[in-house]
Image: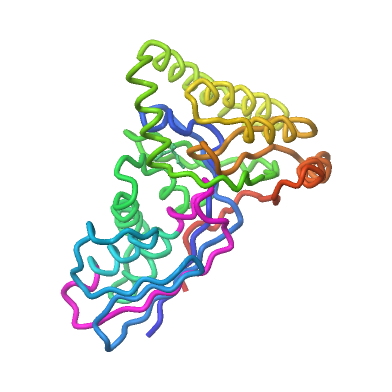
Amino acid sequence: MKSKASAPGKVILFGEHFVVYGVKAILCAIDKRITVSAEKTKERKISIISNIGKLELEKNTSLSEINSPLKPFYFLANKIIKNHDTGIEIIVESDIPLGVGLGSSSACCVAGAAAISRLFSNTTKEEILKLAIEAEKTIFQNTSGADCTVCTYGGIMEYDKENGFTTIESQPNFHLVIANSNIEHSTKVVVAGVKEFKEKNEIEFTTLCNNESKLVDEVLKEIKENNIKEIGNRVTQNQEYLEKIGISNDKLRDMIKIGKNGSFGAKITGAGGGGCIFALTDESNLEKTIKQFKEKNYDCFSAKIDFRGLDTF
Ligand code: MEV
C-alpha cells in the first residue's frame, strides 16, 4: 500500500521574526507544492529519496548522527514505525524552490507527517500538524509553528504563538511576484542573529515589536476589504522594520527596489539573509513587475493564494 500527501509552500506576508516574540503574523499558502509518497518495505530500513539527495538509515539511528536536510523525514518515519515490523521508503517531489523562505521544509514536514502516518491510521489534520512541528524542531528548535500551520490548512491566516491561527475568511485577489536571490540561508542562523540584535537593543526591539503589532492590526482591515494598494503600502513599511533588525543585505535591497517599482509594495519573506522577496500586485501591474525582475536577470515567478492546504490521496 502506498500513501501520498501534498502540502503547499507559504509566504509570510507580515510579521516574520517578530512572530517568534509573540507578535501576530499574517501568512498565506501559495500554489506551489511538495508531494510525498510513503510505502512500507520488507527491508527494515528508512529510505528517503528526493531531488536534493538520498538518505538511507537503519531504524533507531540517533538523530544527533544525522546531518541532512532530510532529517525531519527520518524523524517522522522512525517515530511512526518504531513499533511496527516494517521499513519504509519515502519519495519527495517539489515544485517549491528549496531553502529560500517559501516554506519548503514546513511543507515537507506536513506532507511527510501525513503520508507516513496515514500508512498506519487515519490521522487528523490536527495530529498531522503536531507531528510536523515536532519534525521541524529537529532542524530548527525555535520555530514559532506558523509555517507548518499555514502549510496544513492553506488560505490566508493570522497566527500568533499563544493563540495559534485564525483563518481570514475574505479572499483578497492579489498576486505575489516572488523573486529569488539565490543566496542560501539558514533560518536557524538568521533567527539566532535577530535574538542577538534583541539582546543588545532591548528598547529598540520592543518598539519594533509594538510597531509591527500595530501594522498587522491595521492591515487586517485592509485585507478584509481587499484594498490591495493599501496592503502594498504596509508591505513596504514592514520591510523598513526588517531592515532595522539586520536580516537584509545589498542584493535583497536591490531586488526590493526593483519590485517596488511597478508593484504596490515589496519586502523580504521568511527568515531573510538571502532567500526570497515578494512584490504585491494585481492583474494591472503583474506583467510589468515580472518583466522588471527578468530584465535584471532575477529568477522570479508569480503565485496566488492556495486554499487547498494539505491534501491526502
Ligand atoms: C521563517 O519562515 C519565519 C521566522 O519568523 C521563524 C519562525 O516563525 O519560526 C523567521
Q: Is residue 149 above or below residue 200?
A: below
Residue at the farthest bottom position: 42
Q: Residue at x 49, y 50 (%)?
A: 103
Q: Is residue 108 above or below residue 192?
A: below
Image coordinates for residue 174, horizontal then vertical, percent: 70, 41
Q: Classify residue 28 by image quadrant.
A: top right
Residue interval drawn in magenta: 80-107
Q: Is residue 264 above or below residue 86?
A: above
Q: Tell me, yes or no, if residue 224 can be seen here.
A: no
Image coordinates for residue 297, horizontal then vertical, percent: 76, 47
Q: Classify residue 296 by image quadrant.
A: top right
Query: In the depicted view, which residue is nearer to us: 149 or 168?
Result: 149
Q: Quadrant of ligand 1?
A: top left
Q: Residue at x 43, y 20 (%)?
A: 209
Q: Residue at x 48, y 38 (%)?
A: 271
Q: Residue at x 64, y 26 (%)?
A: 236
Query: In the depicted view, which residue is nearer to us: 292 or 36?
Result: 292
Image coordinates for residue 285, horizontal then vertical, percent: 81, 39
103 drawn magenta: yes
Q: Classify residue 221 by image quadrant.
A: top right
202 drawn magenta: no
Q: Is residue 18 left or right of residue 137?
A: right
Image coordinates for residue 222, horizontal then vertical, percent: 63, 28
Q: Is residue 269 left or right of residue 207?
A: right
